Image (cartoon, rainbow, N blue to C red):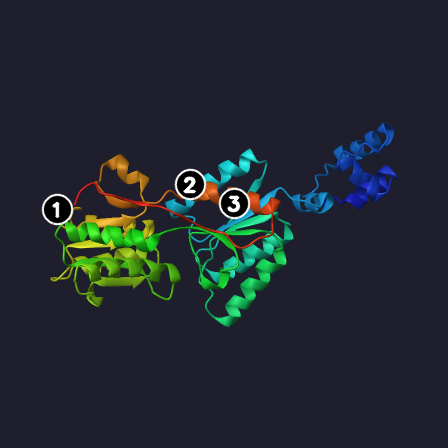
Amino acid sequence: MANVTITDIAREAGVSKATVSRVLNRSASVDSGTRERVEEVIRKKRYSPSTVARNLSYGISSIVGIIVPEIDNPFFGELLRGASSIADKNDLTLMCFNSDDNAEKDYKALKTLKDYRVRGMLYTPATDYDTSEQRKTVTRLIESLDVPVILMDREPAAFERYDGIFFEDRRSMYEATEKLILAGHKKIGIINATLDRGLARIRQAGYRDALEKYHIPYEEKYCYLGDYSVLQAYEHACEMLEKDDRPTAVVTCNNNISMGFLRALQEHGMKIAEDIACIGLDKIEALDIVGSGFNFIRRDAGEMGKKAMEMLIHKMAFPTGEARKVYLDSEVVIRKL
C-alpha cells in the first residue's frame, strides 16, 4: 500500500486537514460524528502518523537524542542504561546513535536529530574537532538543533560553551600509576590512544605526573599509542610482550584496550600479576565471572548517564545561565599486583 498522508484521510472523510489533525491530537473541539467518520477512515487506510509528524503537530517532542562513539565499549553501554532509566521516569524517549569515533557519522546523526525535532541531546563527540573546517561544521549542526546539549566523558575545547559531565581521568591515571610504583615497579608501560586526542593527552598526563613525582624516567619505548580499538591494543600488547626489555607493569586506557591486552596476554601464555601487572581504566564485568583478578579504575558510567539526563532535563526547563561542568570521582580497585 502506498504511503497514506493526512491529505488522503481528509479527502476521503470529507473534512479539512486541520480537522484530521485535531482528531489525531484528541482535541475536544471535534464533534462525535465527525470524529467517528475520520477514525473509521484512519482504520480503513491503516494510517499511522510518523514520530516526526507528531512532533511537528504538537510543537514539542518527547525525544532526546544521544550520540556515543563506541557502542561496543561496555562503558557506554552502562552510560546508556543509566540515561535510559531517568528518561523512562520522565516519559522521554531516547534516540541513540553510534558514531564509531567518526566525524562524518557524528554529522549524520546530528542531521537526523534535527529532522526529528528532538527536545535535547546527550553527546560524546567523535573527535576533538581541532581543524577550523570541522569545528565550523559541527558547531553549525549543533546550533541548528536549537536545543539544550549536555556533553559526556569527553571535553574538547570546541564545546566549552556547553554543560557537561566528566570524570577526573588525569587524577585516576596518576593514582593507578602510583599504585604500580608503590608495588615496586619501575618499568611501567601505557597503551593509549594517539595524543592528538584531548582525552588521551589527559590520561597520558596523569601517567607522566606519577612517574615524575617518583623520579622515574618517561620512556617512549614503553608508550604504545594508537586508537581505542581492541585490535590495535592487541597488536600493541603483542609487540610489548615479545620484547626482551618489556615493562613489568602496564596501564590500559579504556575497556577495549584492556580487552585487547588481555587477549594478547592469554595467547602468550602469560597471567596477570604473575608475569606482568596491569591496571585498566574501567571495570569489565565479564572478568568478575571468570575470576581474572583484573585491577581497574572504577568509573561509574551508569551514574554518569543518570546525572547527564538529570542535567539535561533541568536545562530543558531552565535553558539560560552559564555552562555548568560536573566532575565525578573514580576509584582504583586492586585485586592482584
Q: Identify the residue under disc 3.
A: 311
Q: Indicate whether 308 appears above or below 110.
A: above
- Which label lies toward us, 2 or 1? 2
Residue bearing the label numbered 1: 274
Is 133 rendered above or below residue 316?
Answer: below
Around disc 2, counting alpha carbons within 10 Å, would you say few (fewer than 14), some (14 to 19), or many (20 or more)?
some
Q: Residue lying furthest bottom in this view?
A: 132
Q: Is residue 36 visible?
A: yes
Q: Residues within 10 Å of mark 1 (few under 14, many from 20)?
A: few
Which of discs 3 and 2 lies nearer the camera? The answer is 3
Q: Of 143 and 103, which appears nearest the observer?
A: 143
Proximity of marks 3 and 2: CB atoms separated by less than 8 Å: no
Q: Secondary structure at mark 1?
A: loop
* Element carrying mark 2: helix
Q: Position of residue 252 (x, y in %)?
A: 27, 53
166 sits to left or right of 50: left
The N terminus sits in image quarter: top right
- C-alpha distance separating marks 3 and 1: 44 Å
User: Sequence order check: which comes first, mark 3 or mark 2?
Assistant: 2
Q: Are marks 3 and 1 in contact (CB under 8 Å)?
A: no
Towards the viewer: 183 or 66: 183
Disc number placed over residue 48 in the picture, else none: none
Numbered disc 3: secondary structure: helix
What's under tag 1, amino acid-wise? Glu
Residue 289 vs residue 204, the one in the foreground:
204
User: In the drawing, what numbered circle is on residue 303?
Assistant: 2
Q: Label 3 to label 2, Cα distance in Å?
A: 12 Å
